[in-house]
C-alpha cells in the first residue's frame, strides 16, 4: 500500500520491513516511529488529507494513527479480536472503515473512538475492501461475497456466486462513471448493477 501526504512525501507499507517515507529526490528511509508501531507487518495505509493523518493497518497489532508532519504515532487500537487489519477506507463523512479478519470496525476521528457496529452474519468474516457509492451506499467485499451494508440499520444483503459473481472472494470494489460496480474477485473482474 502507498499514500502521498500533502507535503509530497510518499509513504510505503511493507509486509516485513515496516513503514517507509520519502521522495524520489531525497530517497526513502524507515519511519522514525517504527518501534511505536510494534509491528513490521504493515498491510494497508489510508491518508486523510483534510486532517493530515495516516491510518496504518498491521497484521498483529491492529490500527495505528500517525501524524506525518511530526512523524509520530498518535494512537493505536489493538484488541485481541481485531489485531489483523486487512483494509482501511475513509468515507465521505470522514469515518474510517477498518476491515479485519472478524468483520468491519469503524473509527470516528472527531471523537477518537471506535463506533459500535451491530452487524449480522454476512459481515462476521474477513473484510477485504470497502466502497461508498455516489448514493451513499457502503459496499463491503468479504471472503464470502459482496455485501450491501445499510449503516443506519445494520442490515445487509449478500451477493455471491449464486447471482453470477465469478468468486465469493472479493478483492476490490470501484464504482464506475455509469454507477455500475466493478468488482475484482479471486477469479476475475465483474460488473455489477
Image (spheres, helix red, strand yellow):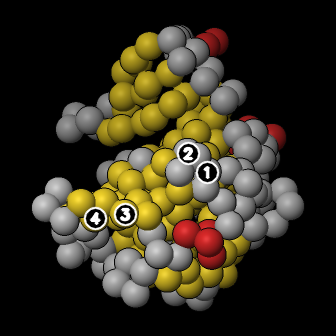
- Marks 1/4: CA–CA distance: 19 Å
Q: Residues within 10 Å of mark 4 (few under 14, many from 20)?
A: some
Q: Earlier in the sequence, mark 1 or mark 4?
A: 4
Task: Determine whether label 4 and label 3 are within 8 Å by CB.
Answer: yes
Determine whether the residue tagged by mark 2 lies in a helix, strand or loop: loop
Determine whether the residue tagged by mark 3 lies in a helix, strand or loop: strand
**Which residue is drawn at the image coordinates 53% and 63% (left, top)?**
56
Q: Which residue is mark 2?
A: 15
Task: Determine whether label 1 and label 2 are within 8 Å by CB.
Answer: yes
Residue 118 visible in the current orientation: yes
Q: Earlier in the sequence, mark 2 or mark 3?
A: 2
**Which residue is drawn at the image coordinates 54% and 18% (left, top)?**
186
Q: Which residue is mark 3?
A: 29
In this view, the mark in front (4 or 3):
3
Q: Earlier in the sequence, mark 3 or mark 1?
A: 3
Q: Is residue 142 left or right of residue 82?
A: left
Amino acid at each position: 500500500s502507498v499514500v502521498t501526504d500533502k507535503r509530497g512525501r510518499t509513504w510505503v507499507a511493507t509486509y516485513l520491513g515496516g513503514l517507509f517515507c520519502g521522495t524520489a529526490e531525497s530517497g526513502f528511509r524507515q519511519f522514525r516511529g517504527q518501534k511505536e508501531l510494534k509491528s513490521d507487518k504493515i498491510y494497508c495505509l489510508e491518508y486523510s488529507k483534510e486532517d493530515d493523518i495516516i491510518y496504518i493497518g498491521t497484521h498483529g497489532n491492529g490500527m495505528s494513527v500517525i501524524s506525518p508532519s511530526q512523524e509520530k504515532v498518535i494512537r493505536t487500537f489493538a484488541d485481541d479480536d481485531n489485531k489483523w487489519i486487512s483494509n482501511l477506507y475513509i468515507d465521505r463523512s470522514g469515518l474510517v472503515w477498518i476491515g479485519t479478519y472478524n468483520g468491519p470496525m469503524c473509527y470516528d476521528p472527531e471523537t477518537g473512538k471506535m463506533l459500535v457496529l451491530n452487524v449480522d452474519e454476512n459481515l462476521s468474516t474477513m473484510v477485504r475492501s470497502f466502497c461508498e457509492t455516489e448514493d451513499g451506499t457502503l459496499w463491503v467485499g468479504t471472503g464470502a461475497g459482496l455485501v450491501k451494508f445499510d449503516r443506519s440499520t445494520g442490515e445487509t444483503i449478500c451477493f455471491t456466486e449464486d447471482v453470477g459473481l465469478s468468486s465469493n472472494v472479493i478483492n476490490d470494489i470501484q464504482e464506475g462513471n455509469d454507477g455500475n460496480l466493478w468488482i475484482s474477485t479471486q477469479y476475475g473482474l465483474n460488473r455489477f448493477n
